[in-house]
Image (cartoon, rainbow, N blue to C red):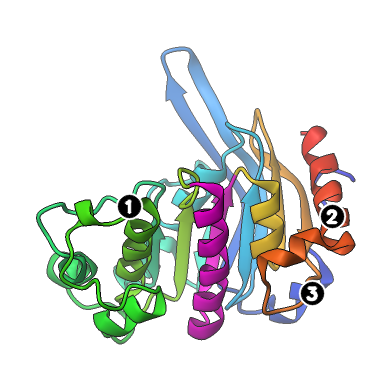
Amino acid sequence: MALDETVSPQIAPNIAEPAIRLDNVTVRFTTERGTVTALDRINLVVPKGGFLTLLGPSGCGKSTLLRVVADIIKPASGTARVFGADPDAARRRRDIGFVFQDPALLPWRTVIENVTLPFEVGGGGGGARQNPEDLLKLVGLAGWEKAFPHELSGGMRQRVSIARALVNSPRLLMMDEPFGALDEITRDRLNEELLSVWERTGTTILFVTHSIYEAAFLGQEVLLLAARPGRVRAQVPVDLPMPRKVAIREEPHFAKLVTRLRGVLEGC
């Protein structure tokens, strides 16, 4: 598969007003050893309500790309648009929620108090506030509202962080390897639950992972990045039925998709 493969036809109908549009985005960092190009001329379109997984070797710029969209990092050149505006406008409107690999819960606050923290530190957002109790039900934590983080498993703590990210009704959810530190069974269960949350909320999701299986299972499309410098290797559509269950990974069609993604990665 050639470098810079064109955007797949399935997102073309939404191209006029996408959730995310990157045009020739380049990011450089200055270090003691000189200037490093982290991302090189990235072009990307993600439709509203889409689910895009980002896959690639370490150092290919997956997390950097998320941070450009979230207005944490400014590109050296090129333009980024989020819901038709600059990323800083989307951030100020509270259009963006972020979930990291570490749940980063405050240990002295209960589950419900951690979920409502954005109300206290950030004020109102562009969308309506979600009911925290309803969000905890959505992520499978009904009845745990008064528990403290030390009483929860790793998977439960990550569920709290997802609920917290959704509490201000973000239109875009950025997830940077949120399940990477979890055991396989818990990770599979949270993969299924995340797809359920996505279907019920209609939130656009960008999801970074190192797992080929996770990328194929979750995404409507998989963006594969090559390293040194970070650049688009391919953007592969995922033709799997919804709703998806982990058992689909045993089917030949899924195995064929994983083989295709692995083949692209081996060329990165």
Q: Which mark is residue 40?
A: none
Q: Which one is in front, 176 or 90? A: 176
Vertical arrangement, residue 249 with respect to residue 198, above or below: above
- Residues drawn in magenta: 183-209
> What is the x, y in percent for residue 144?
24, 71
Locate the C terminus by quadrant: top right
> What is the x, y in percent for residue 191?
56, 63
Q: Tell me the kind of residue under disc 2.
A: Ala
Q: CA distance from mark 1 to mark 3?
A: 33 Å
Task: Find residue 88 and report its image quarter.
Answer: bottom left
Q: Tell me the kind of residue under disc 3.
A: Gln
Q: Which mark is residue 103?
A: 1
Residue under circle 2?
A: 255
Rendered residue at 55%/54% (across/down): 185
Q: Is residue 197 left or right of residue 48?
A: left
Q: CA distance from mark 1 to mark 2?
A: 31 Å
Task: Find residue 135 and report its image quarter.
Answer: bottom left
Q: CA distance from mark 2 to mark 3?
A: 21 Å
Magenta portion: prevailing SS class? helix
Secondary structure found at label 2? helix
User: Dot 2: within a 10 Å radius of its alpha carbon, few (fewer than 14), some, or many (20 or more) residues?
Assistant: some
Name the mark nearer the viewer: 1 or 3: 1
Q: Is residue 82 left or right of residue 264?
A: left
Residue under circle 3?
A: 10
Rendered residue at 51%/22% (across/down): 35
